[in-house]
Image: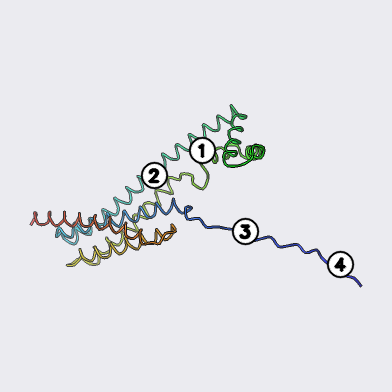
Amino acid sequence: MTHATAAHVPSPLPPHHEPHRSQHGGWLRAAVLGANDGLISTGSLVLGMATAQAAPSAILLGGVAGLAAGALSMAAGEYVSVSSQADAERADARIEARALREHPEAELDELAAIYVHRGLAPALARQVAEQLTAHDDLAAHLRDEVGINELHRARPVQAALASALAFTCGALPPVLLAWLWPGAGLPLVLVAVTLALLAALGFAAERIAGGSGLRGALRVLLWGALAQAATALIGHLFGAAAG
């Protein structure tokens, strides 16, 4: 009695994935910028008012107002900035769509030339250009000629909300300190907590980006310390003058 032996079919290889740090560039920049801005600006504002010997209720009110104004300012600024980028992308899309309608052969030659410049043989570049044009000619030109792709498309509302949220997260610790520590010693506690959080934020941001973390912590500490020193000095001078 014989048994048919099934042919051995090798299992497909698992997909290969390489994590790239630059993929985090957009959201990481926005998150770090918003949180840093919230922590430094609001912390410095509260510190300046505290060193000016303002009343605890006034310090807390200033911190809350700084948080709200800063978050809305970040959202508005990011929305306007990213909307301008989105307008430019839509204008480029209209230009390419018109060129494809009016000069399809010239656009095909242009796309093939791009692939030749990237290293493909002319015949293969032409074949790739024809297949991509048949699949989605506008997307191919926007991606390979202009540099616009879906992954990095401008999204104004998303950018505005992310910036406002990041600023709020950074501004909350100084405001909470002004609320929970309304007595003496608030300036020293503010400086210590703000600088510690800035160092942690700078360290984490550089680690996510692939660095050691130390340079990120040091550079954000430098600018945070300068901002706090300036506002503490201003608050002290104005407080002494008012006294």
Kindly indicate the quadrant of the structure image that contains residue 182. Answer: bottom left
Residue tagged 3 = 15
Q: CA distance from mark 4 to mark 3?
A: 32 Å
Q: Is residue 77 left or right of residue 208?
A: left
At label 1, counting other C-alpha atoms closer than 10 Å, the crowd grade (few under 14, some 14-19, many 20 or more) is some
- Looking at the rendered structure, the secondary structure element under dot 1 is helix
- Looking at the rendered structure, the secondary structure element under dot 3 is loop
Residue tagged 1 = 146
Q: Mark 2 against mark 1, which lies toward the viewer?
A: 1
Q: Which quarter of the rendered picture does the N terminus lie within? A: bottom right
Q: Amino acid at mark 1?
A: Val
Q: Position of residue 97 (x, y in %)?
A: 55, 32
Q: Position of residue 99 (x, y in %)?
A: 56, 29
Q: Mark 2 against mark 3, which lies toward the viewer?
A: 3
Q: Is label 1 in contact with label 4 (beta carbons under 8 Å)?
A: no
Q: Is residue 101 above or below residue 214?
A: above
N-term-proximal mark, 3 vs 1: 3
Q: Amino acid at mark 3?
A: Pro
- Looking at the rendered structure, the secondary structure element under dot 4 is loop
Q: Mark 4 against mark 2, which lies toward the viewer?
A: 4
Residue tagged 2 = 79
Q: In the depicted view, which residue is nearer to us: 15 or 93?
A: 15
N-term-proximal mark, 2 vs 1: 2
Q: Amino acid at mark 2?
A: Tyr
Q: Is residue 38 above or below residue 6?
A: above
